[in-house]
Image (cartoon, rainbow, N blue to C red):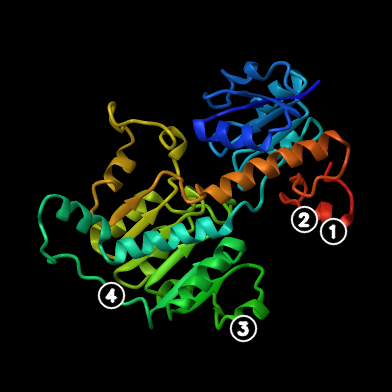
């Protein structure tokens, strides 16, 4: 009998890519367009595995409910897991993820936001569509020779840094675990956050969300930044205090913001509100700024990334059900999968 998987927050493209990856029919995938939460977890009845995405609710009550239904594995089809209560999962079920699908996809999207903001491509597009071919208000600046700051030098942050270095930018990077050999190879320099904030014209966030990094961009850190700085966030929405960002935009301290994530995005992103409007005053205010570009968590959304997500997710599930070690299992102790690889054992 095929393994039963309840896949929540399903979109048509999820079904397309997962059906392709499941061409052998090894898995019985039940697609649910609703998000996983206390009111929908009953849909997982009879499933051995729940497949969840970034905005699904994997809080303690939901995990306890899934455990009661006999679900033994939560397979995240994403890298981030800040929506999972790992402490509650411990001893009840295992949690696996897709730590790297296409870091190039996210890095390239971050750079595309920077380029569009700097050269006002979004404004120029709207103008020429209306027959307006003037250049007033479209002035940008050369990236070449300017300083950029990359916060977080995981896979995505590294690729972003290398791309900007290729533009001829001087790149400062910051990470609690510096890789100086990599930095030296590409002509980059590790710096403390205060120096990075104060010295760079462009800042791009690529770090995970944790209690320490939550609202790392706030009124105090914005005050340290150069006037007119361009801020890019393709990491996690809550890395940025949105209200402080609005104040920075109003004062001109922030010259532009490219946001693929938003701290309250779970209420809006991946859904269509074009006919009902946006009740979130902060998000609505951000959308009014001509120097703010908001994309709906689409940085990952490339052909290559979607293929990798579906393939890796099903591989994770297959390995787990076979009793084999899953390298992508998240550990309750260290909130990563590294310990399993280092110790040669399972996280639980």
* Sequence-wise first label, 1 or 4: 4
- Distance (Cα) linking label 4 and label 2: 41 Å
Residue of label 2? 338
Residue of label 4? 141
Residue 128, percent from left and from top = 16, 55
Quarter holding the N terminus is top right
- Distance (Cα) linking label 3 and label 2: 25 Å
- Distance (Cα) linking label 1 and label 4: 46 Å
Q: Taking 260 as reference, is 118 above or below it?
A: below
Q: Secondary structure at mark 1?
A: helix
- Distance (Cα) linking label 1 and label 3: 27 Å
Q: Secondary structure at mark 4?
A: loop
Between tags 1 and 4, which lies in front?
4
Residue of label 3? 184
Between tags 4 and 2, which lies in front?
4
- The answer to whether the residues at label 4 and label 2 have Cβ atoms under 8 Å apart is no
Outermost front residue:
24
Q: Which mark is residue 342?
A: 1
- The answer to whether the residues at label 2 and label 1 have Cβ atoms under 8 Å apart is yes
Q: Taking 274 as reference, is 245 above or below it?
A: below
Residue 131, percent from left and from top = 10, 53
- Regarding residue 220, the answer to whether it shows in the image is no
Q: Is residue 324 left or right of residue 116?
A: right
């Amino acid at each position: 009998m095929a393994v039963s998987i309840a896949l929540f927050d399903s979109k048509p493209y999820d079904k397309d890519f997962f059906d392709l990856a499941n061409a052998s029919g090894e898995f019985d995938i039940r697609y649910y367009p609703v998000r996983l939460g206390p009111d929908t977890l009953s849909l997982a009845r009879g499933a051995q595995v729940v497949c969840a995405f970034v905005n699904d609710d994997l809080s303690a009550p939901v995990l306890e409910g899934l455990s009661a239904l006999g679900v033994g594995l939560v397979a995240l089809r994403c890298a981030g897991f800040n929506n999972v209560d790992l402490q509650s999962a411990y001893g009840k079920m295992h949690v696996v993820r897709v730590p790297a699908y296409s870091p190039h996809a996210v890095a390239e999207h971050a750079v595309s936001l920077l380029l569009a903001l700097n050269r006002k491509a979004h404004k120029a597009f709207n103008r020429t569509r209306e027959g307006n071919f003037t250049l007033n208000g479209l002035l940008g600046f050369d990236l070449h020779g300017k300083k950029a700051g990359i916060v977080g030098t995981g896979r995505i942050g590294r690729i972003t840094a290398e791309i900007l270095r290729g533009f001829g930018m001087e790149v400062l990077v910051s990470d609690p675990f510096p890789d100086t050999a990599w930095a030296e190879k590409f002509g980059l320099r590790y710096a403390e956050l205060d120096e990075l904030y104060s010295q760079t014209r462009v800042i791009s966030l690529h770090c995970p969300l944790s209690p320490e990094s939550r609202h790392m961009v706030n009124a105090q850190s914005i005050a340290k930044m150069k006037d007119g700085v361009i801020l890019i966030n393709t990491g996690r929405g809550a890395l940025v205090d949105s209200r402080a960002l609005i104040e920075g935009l109003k004062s001109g301290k922030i010259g532009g913001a490219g946001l693929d994530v938003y701290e309250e995005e779970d209420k809006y992103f991946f859904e269509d509100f074009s006919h009902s409007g946006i009740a979130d005053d902060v998000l609505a205010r951000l959308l009014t700024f001509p120097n703010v570009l908001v994309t709906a968590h689409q940085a990952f959304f490339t052909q290559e990334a979607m293929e990798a997500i579906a393939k890796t997710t099903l591989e994770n599930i297959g390995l787990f059900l076979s009793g084999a070690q899953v390298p992508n299992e998240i550990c309750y102790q260290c909130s990563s999968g590294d310990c399993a690889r280092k110790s040669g054992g399972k996280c639980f």
